[in-house]
Amino acid sequence: MTGESRTLEDFRTEVRQWCRTNIPVDWRRAQTGVSDREFVEFQQSWFQRLRADGFAVPHWPKEYGGGMSSAEQVVLYQELAAHDAPRLVLAFVSIHHAAATLLAAGTDEQRRRHLPAILDGEIWCQGFSEPGAGSDLAALATTARRGPDGYVVNGQKLWASGAQYAEWCLLLARTDPDAPARQGISYFLLDMRSPGVEVRPIRQATGESHFCEIFLDDVVIATDRLVGRENTGWQVAQRTLGAERGMTMLELAERLGNGGFGRLVESCPLDDPVVLDRLAALEIELTGLRALCADFVAGAAPGPADASIVKLYYSELLQRMTDFGTEMAGLAAHTELRKPLSSGWESGAWMLDFLGSWEWTIPGGTSEIQRTIIGERGLGLPREPRGK
Amino acid sequence: MNSNHTDDLAELHAEVAAVARELLADSAPRWATIARAGWPGLEVSAAFDGADAGFAEVAVILTEIGRAAASGPYPAVAALGVGALNHVVPTPDRDRLLRETAAGAVVPIVALAGEGMGEKRFRIENSPRGPLLRGAAEFVLDVPDAGRLLVPAVDPAGEVVLVDLDPRARGLLVTERPVLDATRSFGDIVAEDVSPESLWHFEDGYRCDAVGRLRDRAAVAVACDSLGLSRAMLDATVAHVAVREQFGRAIGSFQAVKHACADMLVQVTVAGKLVDAAVRAVTASGADASTSASMAKSYACATAVDIAGKAMQLHGGMGYTWESGIHVYLKRAALNRSLFGSPAQHRARLARRYSVQAPRRRGA
Ligand SMILES: Cc1cc2nc3c(=O)[nH]c(=O)nc-3n(C[C@H](O)[C@H](O)[C@H](O)COP(=O)(O)OP(=O)(O)OC[C@H]3O[C@@H](n4cnc5c(N)ncnc54)[C@H](O)[C@@H]3O)c2cc1C
């Protein structure tokens, strides 16, 4: 036991040292209002710097360049957060969603093809949502029909984050229109350079364009790019989506608790007892969130609603905090016209950070959907009535 | 006030609101259009070609402007410019400016700092060259549009007077302050030894607390704006959730969504009551005007942020897009919350009354 804890402490010292020498100073300013190309270049170079010392994909299996224990990952993310390191926003879908999908359900060939490429910087996006299928993902209408060269895909995807930079897309499409909604869906790896793929960025509330529409017009996907068996896409999506959340949430919670709370304290008049009371209340909430996340990643058998509890609590706390920051900063909060790309949505450009908090309460299952899941799966309450 | 009169007023206000809504539906009506509608002169007496109406009618327009998230200097002119000009002792210069304001020919902007509850920031000092104005104010609403600048300043006798200036006067520096809320404009003012063109005294009732009175009008004007934008967000959300289907049902039939909308309605309704009361109190210039203004400002502006935020949430991904326009309302609501006194500052002002009352109660 003592041996193990010393190892962890050594590791912490090592990561701390690494952070001191490797985190680019002033990186936040270097990413403010820069061109798309500069943003991509910076993110790629940061990814490679982490990779060089084995910190980019600690959650992957050892043979692919990962292999860190959960406890070590906790230490790694705590230290990255404490040292205000940049986040891997661009590689997010690749190293989490894509990797988890391939590891859980991909073929050997798919893993060999993509996991090393992701380490070399291959960028992925997630094409799940559609105009008619958001909260009700199973209602998706994009079709994939077998043709002579593979599947022929037609339809429209919406809100795909980072699709303008992506080389590959995790795509859900309907392969059996007659099956019940969840049973007729398949999971594909789509090469974004395929003929018939058109990407249009959508401008979001903060003024940036991080998510996109993807139009698919007779796009051919070879059969060896099907993940899992035909019509099992729903299960693949469920299993792989849940897998990635824990450590990510821990990282975000640590960032919010460190830099985020620090910036909030800086924005507040500390001679007002009411403000002090609210700050202390937020610190308590943050401490609770960090404990929640630490337990969640350490938990051998997470409860059926734990992921939802963490997601809901994080996103709404983030919203309350950035709202309070906006209020405290007064009119000055409104003069930051460009969002400095922050490490965890706590850049101190409070109004933009506050707007950005809806990037957490809407995607990945809205707060309303999370509450329903917590009620039904966590408490066993009767299911909400649904149409059809 | 008998009930017939109240009904007539309600009817009149509904009519004014309907006309305003129509005019504002046309995206960003120009100042000329607003002037032609007679809005700048609503609260100006007929003697100066105004409509002889009151702050209550102005409040109806201000609420509709919030509903449309309309840009332009009308709120600053109506709440502050006309408010100040109506309450100074008449002089020929003042009368001319008031007449031009009512006609929409000139945009008078009052130099009140946008942040806080209003310290006095300008003063007049006597010098061999005559009286000179000095001071600075940040976040002055709509000052980039100013045709005339009206600066409340403390004169050597300690009285607050109103200085009338050309915004391009020598020694005066006006710099724009761009904000995220693209529907609003602000500027910072620095005055270094500016010679006033005219210098007006406030009339008796206003004299002892002219800046406070103007700030109350400003606070209520912003409360009206937030009330209007809250109503717009509620309407848009209800319309959306009634037709958007997920899981084979209109999302408005899910209890989570229904309850969120219901809460919005409750908040909007209460905000409406507080704003109405504040408008009445400011119109009557009673002793309770500040209290009502603070209640309306803090409640309507705080809840407007919650309501616009819920609207964004209930529109799903669509609500987070630039195109949906909900961000325009959320930005304006959050800015309104900080403008002319934050909710916390207004609540603190309300709470100061308790310690005045407390000893009396203890004595009883
Ligand atoms: C910034 C951002 C990034 C995103 N990135 C991606 C991405 O990379 N890839 C991808 O595939 N998708 C992505 N999404 C899409 C996201 O997952 C959906 O927006 C989300 O699931 C909500 O779906 P919707 O937008 O259709 O809203 P809707 O489903 O129409 O929901 C509208 C409102 O109704 C409520 N509601 C709906 N159903 C119920 C119910 N049963 N009970 C109670 N309330 C309900 C919702 O909570 C919400 O408030 C992103 C979205 C955003 C905002």
Image: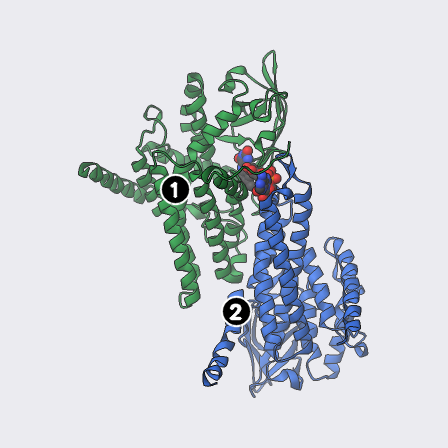
Chain colours: A green, B blue
Query: Which label is found at residue A251?
Result: 1
- Residue B110 appears at what percent x and percent y? 64, 72
Q: Is residue A290 above or below residue B84?
A: above
Q: Residue at x 25, y 42 (%)?
A: A13
Tell me if residue A287 can be seen: yes
Q: In which quarter of the image is ligand 1?
A: top right
Q: In this view, does B247 lie above or below B315?
A: above
Query: Which label is found at residue B347?
Result: 2
Give the chain of mark 1. Answer: A
Which quarter of the figure is the N terminus of chain A placed in? top left
- Residue A110 appears at what percent x and percent y? 45, 19
Give the chain of mark 2. Answer: B
Q: In this view, does A227 lie above or below B89?
A: above
Q: Which residue lies furthest to the left in this view?
A: A2
- The residue carrying pointer 1 sits among few (fewer than 14), some (14 to 19) or many (20 or more) residues within 10 Å by Cα, namely many
What amino acid is at disc 2? Arg
Camera-side mark, 1 or 2: 2
Query: In the figure, is residue A289 to the left or right of B98?
Result: left
Q: Does the residue labelled 1 lie within 8 Å of ligand 1?
A: no
What amino acid is at disc 1? Glu
Q: Residue furthest top?
A: A148
- Residue B244 appears at what percent x and percent y? 66, 40
